[in-house]
Image (tube, rainbow, N blue to C red):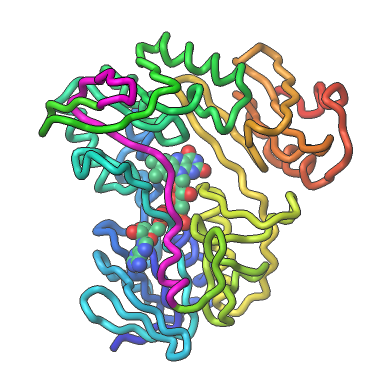
Amino acid sequence: MLHYKYLIIGGGMAAASAVEGIREVDPGGEIGVITAEGDPPYDRPPLSKQLWTGQKKMDDILRPVSREGVTFHLQRTAKTLKPAHKQVTDDTGETYTFEKLLLATGGTPRRLPFGGDNIIYLRTLESYRRLRDLAGREDAFAVIGGGFIGSEIAAALAMNGKKVSIIMPEKGICDRLFPADVVAFLNDYYRQKGVEVLANEMAANLEGRGADLEVVIKNNRRVAANGVVAGIGIIPNVQLAEAAGLETGNGILVDAALRTSHPDIFAAGDVANFFDSALGARRRVEHEDLANSMGKAAGRSMAGEPVNFRHSPMFYSDMFEIGYEAVGELDSRLNVAADWQEKYHTGVLYYLDESQVRGVLLWNVWGKVDEARALIAAGEKVSAASLKGRIAHS
Ligand SMILES: Cc1cc2nc3c(=O)[nH]c(=O)nc-3n(C[C@H](O)[C@H](O)[C@H](O)COP(=O)(O)OP(=O)(O)OC[C@H]3O[C@@H](n4cnc5c(N)ncnc54)[C@H](O)[C@@H]3O)c2cc1C
């Protein structure tokens, strides 16, 4: 049986930041990290962006996690958690006890009901290596899903000279995020970049073998591809917490100190459901900024520092030459007041719910995230007209 003062389940970005947070407060307490992956912590966002454009190399994405008093148990999956005994057992039967535990288990890609292992679900470094290797040998790729991962990896593959088709049931690229005119613009933009955009189309099956595949679309059209990637969302890994009787909803519920319903068990990152003080509501967010800030705060909290987590996370994405940062709720069902300096090139889009700003999209506008956060947190009543120029474009 292994004993750690601090035990972390998950070896992703929240876990890496938690190790930093613990070390800022407690320089010596033994830390154990159980992670299902064969790689130590790394940054995930470059898997669909900078590793494809050459802006980053593999060494750049590895997290410089302290090894002082930190033991990584790689390729181990935690299977049971007994809060009353402060005990965790992994898939090899190894048992760990802890004083404080962090659940940083992230999420698992949602899978399609067909295609099996012929479909690459881009989430881990291992899945990136597989796709990269295939892209080194093959030419044609089908991407299923038009959200963050799908739109980014379609752009990355196209920028690497690949023939790419992107298939989605929605009206277009990032339809759940952006207003209809921006989605229509993005569809055209991707097409100009040589990507076949198949919007309002549902992938229904995958036929063929090896690098000779065909995605069958509901209307019976077929898309030939040597490789298929899917990005259709993740399911938060709450099973351990649920089976242990911790409070869960959409994710594992945590308080402002990032504690779960058990006083010595904490949660952070994609799996955690927290109170976003700027929005005045509970939410679960799947973004790097949250994994890093919440992971670090959870580490400090585990080490005994009083923590009142009030961070409102930002997120960002790159699609060819377009880049954006955003904060708050970006939901295309909200009313959007657009303040373009140059239409679809540079602008600020305000997402409004009953005259209150709930989200801000900074389209090729940089360094304004804190202003956007402050505007959302102010919660004042605004009109679309009053928002013109509210956040400057440069
Ligand atoms: C390709 C890609 C691109 C992205 N791009 C962006 C972006 O541009 N901007 C942005 O803000 N966000 C982006 N994200 C999202 C961001 O990477 C995530 O929000 C972040 O990784 C979440 O960190 P986490 O530590 O909570 O979870 P994860 O990084 O998912 O880590 C969870 C870890 O827990 C392990 N685990 C789970 N269950 C167990 C268990 N029972 N036992 C042991 N280990 C377990 C998993 O194997 C994994 O290693 C991207 C994600 C991907 C995949």
Q: Is residue 199 visible?
A: yes
Q: For residue 45, what is the image quadrant?
A: top left
- Magenta stretch contains residue 226: yes
Residue situated furthest front in the rendering: 219
Where residue 82 sits, quadrant-wise, is bottom left
What residue sits 43% from the left and 21% below the top? 199
94 or 324: nearer the viewer? 94
**Left or right relative to 288: residue 31:** left
Residue 386, located in which quarter of the rendered image? top right
Q: What span is colored magenta in the figure? A: 216-243
Asked if residue 45 is positioned above or below residue 26 in the image, the reply reads: above
Q: Is residue 321 above or below residue 132?
A: above
* Quadrant where the image shows the C terminus: top right
Q: Nearer the viewer, residue 217 or 344?
A: 217
Tell me what residue is drawn at x 21 percent, y 44 percent. Answer: 116
**Residue drawn where x is 63% and y is 30% of the image:** 366
Q: Is residue 189 left or right of residue 276?
A: left
Q: Please tell me whether residue 352 belongs to the stretch shown in magenta.
A: no
The residue lying toward the viewer, choosing from 5 and 257, is: 257
